[in-house]
Image (cartoon, grey):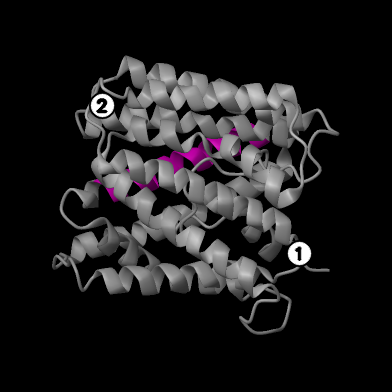
């Protein structure tokens, strides 16, 4: 088996786990507030993430070297987590994924002011076409727009912003700082939200929040293995397979019909995203490669960014 094939298969498996992660969120979201689910998922993530952090070879504290950027990224991660959990709890899975698929396109836009990149005509055209796909999905005037749609778009923007900030910081911050600050931010923000809305949880449902944490971490490691095995230009597009999982899960578990407009819009967004990844994969286009290395979903504590895990889990010398 070639490295690219192994990488693609590992990425497909990771996206299956991420999709299952989101299905559990949606299942619990039918009974409990989204912020409550995120709170307990964050809480139960600490023991799992602590095992990962024990591998951090760099001594130091949680005090960031670039506090402004770290705080901004933490806020983005908190918004992405809250918005993502709410969107998955209230919208059909395919609609949420279609909107979140705009993340690499938004990264391309944000890389201009934050990374100083020059985006050529081809990538600008891909961004415009991709964002038009969002209008196909949302169908203004053709369907009732919900708060969940706004949350999904906010999650995509916040996730893109967090991804670009990581690329800007490079290795200036310890992985522990980049991972723990969003975890603590999510924990504090969602804990405060419990005072507004709280629903007593059954033990089995509480255990499912632990499953959310475990699935996010396991999928993150599979993504690491995928990018180690294959080329980014081959591995990255496999992330779009989540739309297939969403269609299958939505059909069988939630009785969600296949919406032609959503699938068409998703196809437009996916084609644009793949083109951006392909352009970056050609070399000499993006010095930072932010879109190629970005996961196409809202960054939350239960699904830590693979670039951070990669740095934590790098072979010791």
Q: CA distance from mark 1 to mark 2?
A: 43 Å
Residue located at (35% from left, 46% from top)? 151
Of labels 1 and 2, the one closer to you: 1
Q: Is residue 225 left or right of residue 153?
A: right
Residue located at (66% from left, 27% from top)? 124
Give the percent coordinates (x, y) of residue 257.
Answer: 24, 22
Residue 152: name its quadrant: top left
Q: Nearer the viewer, residue 60 or 9?
A: 60
> Dot 1 corresponds to which residue?
171
> Dot 2 corresponds to which residue?
251
Q: Nearer the viewer, residue 132 or 60?
A: 132
Asked if the stretch drawn in magenta spans residue 78, the answer is no
Q: Secondary structure at mark 1?
A: loop
Mark number displayed over residue 57: none
Q: Earlier in the sequence, mark 1 or mark 2?
A: 1
Q: Which residues are magenta?
A: 7-26
How busy is the neighbourhood of tag 2: few (under 14 within 10 Å), some, or many (20 plus)?
A: some
């Amino acid at each position: 088996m070639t490295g690219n094939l192994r990488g693609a298969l590992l990425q497909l498996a990771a996206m299956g786990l991420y999709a299952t992660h989101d299905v559990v969120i949606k299942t619990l979201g039918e009974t409990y507030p989204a912020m409550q689910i995120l709170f307990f998922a964050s809480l139960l993530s600490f023991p799992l993430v602590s095992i990962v952090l024990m591998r951090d070879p760099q001594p130091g504290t949680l005090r960031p070297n670039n506090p402004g950027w770290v705080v901004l990224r933490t806020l983005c991660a908190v918004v992405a987590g809250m918005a993502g959990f709410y969107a998955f709890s209230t919208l059909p899975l395919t609609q949420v994924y279609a909107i979140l698929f705009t993340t690499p396109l938004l990264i391309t836009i944000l890389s201009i002011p934050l990374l100083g990149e020059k985006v050529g005509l081809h990538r600008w055209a891909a961004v415009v076409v991709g964002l038009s796909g969002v209008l196909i999905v949302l169908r203004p005037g053709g369907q009732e727009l919900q708060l969940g749609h706004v949350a999904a778009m906010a999650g995509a923007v916040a996730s893109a912003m967090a991804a670009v900030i990581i690329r800007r910081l490079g290795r200036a911050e310890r992985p522990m700082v980049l991972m723990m600050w969003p975890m603590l931010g999510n924990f504090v923000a969602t804990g405060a939200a419990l005072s507004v809305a709280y629903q007593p949880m059954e033990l089995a449902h509480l255990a499912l929040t632990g499953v959310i944490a475990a699935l996010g971490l396991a999928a993150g490691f599979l993504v690491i293995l995928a990018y180690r095995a294959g080329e980014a230009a081959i591995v990255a597009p496999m992330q779009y397979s989540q739309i297939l999982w969403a269609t299958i899960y939505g059909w069988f578990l939630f009785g969600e019909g296949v919406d032609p407009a959503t699938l068409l819009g998703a196809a437009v967004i996916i084609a644009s995203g793949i083109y951006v990844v392909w352009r970056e994969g050609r070399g000499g286009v993006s010095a930072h490669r932010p879109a190629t290395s970005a996961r196409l979903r809202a960054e939350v504590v239960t699904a830590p960014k693979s670039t951070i895990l990669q740095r934590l889990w790098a072979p010791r010398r």
